[in-house]
Amino acid sequence: MTATHSATRPVGGNPAFSERITTEYLAPTPAERDTMSRGGVAVKLLVDLTVLIAAAAWGWASATQPVAQDAAGGYANVTVTIPAGFWLASFGAFFVGIMTSMNPRRAAVTGLIYAALQGYCLGAISAAFEAQTEGIVGAAILSTVGVFAAAWFLYVTGLIKPTRKLAFGVAAGIGGLCMLYFFVFIVSLFDWGWLYSDSFRTIGVVVTLIAIVLAALSFTLGFAQIDVGVQAGAPKFMEWYCAYGLMVTFIWLYIEILRLLALLNRNN
């Protein structure tokens, strides 16, 4: 994650990289002998993503059940249902995420728990999308990795500067999206059919594209926050927390890309 320009102190749009985290933890701590490094963050991120993927495989398997066997073709038809522990894992991930953000020192443990819980939910959700559109999950995964690589390239080349104005814009955009999602949720309670209309499909595509751009910019801001911590000599445990912050953006980006592909393939 080495940057070709000096890191500033923007406050990222990702809630995991709040101003409190930057001020209190991404700063030198005399009591800490070991300090964080970019390589350390990368290794921790790989560990978190490995747990996330393993749990996603479990969630996928829990959501799919074979219902018939085609002897000639040699494949089984499957039905997808929400697994029993889905909602428990969802609420659990929410509370574990709050605990992690409140105390980054816990991230080595709570970050892995969060990855496991979110991975289980993502696996079940992915199975449902795949049942409707074959190949959509693979395309979403490749696209997520591609967006991450593009965000990293834009950061290290300095094509996008992680300034405070950019951070403010991303935070404002994410806040606006949250309000819009809440509005859609309220409307759907009174008119569920609107979610399947052509007008909602058009609006959904535009909004989801905006969300993907915001997620990519969140990656760029996250890289800048990591460089701030490295240059300041932040404590070693922040490697786990920064990896957790990047993982949160990975999950958000994957869900948005999955939603975009589903909207684009709705009429196919």
Image: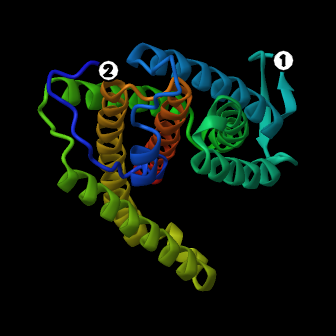
> Tag 2: residue type?
Met
Q: Is residue 261 visible?
A: no
Q: Are marks 1 and 2 in contact (CB under 8 Å)?
A: no
| Nearer to me, 195 or 46 | 46
From the viewer's perspective, is 201 left or right of 106?
left
Inter-mark Cα distance, 1 to 2: 51 Å
Report whether 199 appears left or right of 66.
Answer: left
Residue in the image at 56% along x and 40% along y? 133
Q: How is the image coloured?
A: rainbow
> How busy is the neighbourhood of tag 2: few (under 14 within 10 Å), some, or many (20 plus)?
some
Q: Secondary structure at mark 1?
A: loop
Give the residue at the far bottom of this rendering. 190
The amino acid type, in three-letter code, at marker 1 is: Ala
Which residue is rendered at x = 57% and y = 48% of the image? 101
The quarter of the picture where the N terminus appears is: top left
Q: Quadrant of residue 145?
A: top left
Please, is residue 261 above or below residue 71 in the view? below
Q: Nearer the viewer, mark 1 or mark 2?
A: 2
Q: Mark 2 — residue?
A: 1
Which residue is found at the position 51% from the left and 18% from the top? 33
- Residue sitting at 22 percent across and 33 percent down? 7
Question: In this orientation, does residue 255 appear?
Answer: yes
Give the percent coordinates (x, y) of residue 22. 39, 44
User: Could you tell which of marks 1 and 2 lies nearer the N-terminus?
Assistant: 2
Q: Secondary structure at mark 2?
A: loop
Q: Is residue 210 left or right of residue 51?
A: left
Disc 1 marks which residue? 71
Q: Is residue 39 left or right of residue 48?
A: left
- Residue 43 drawn at (x, y percent): 51, 15
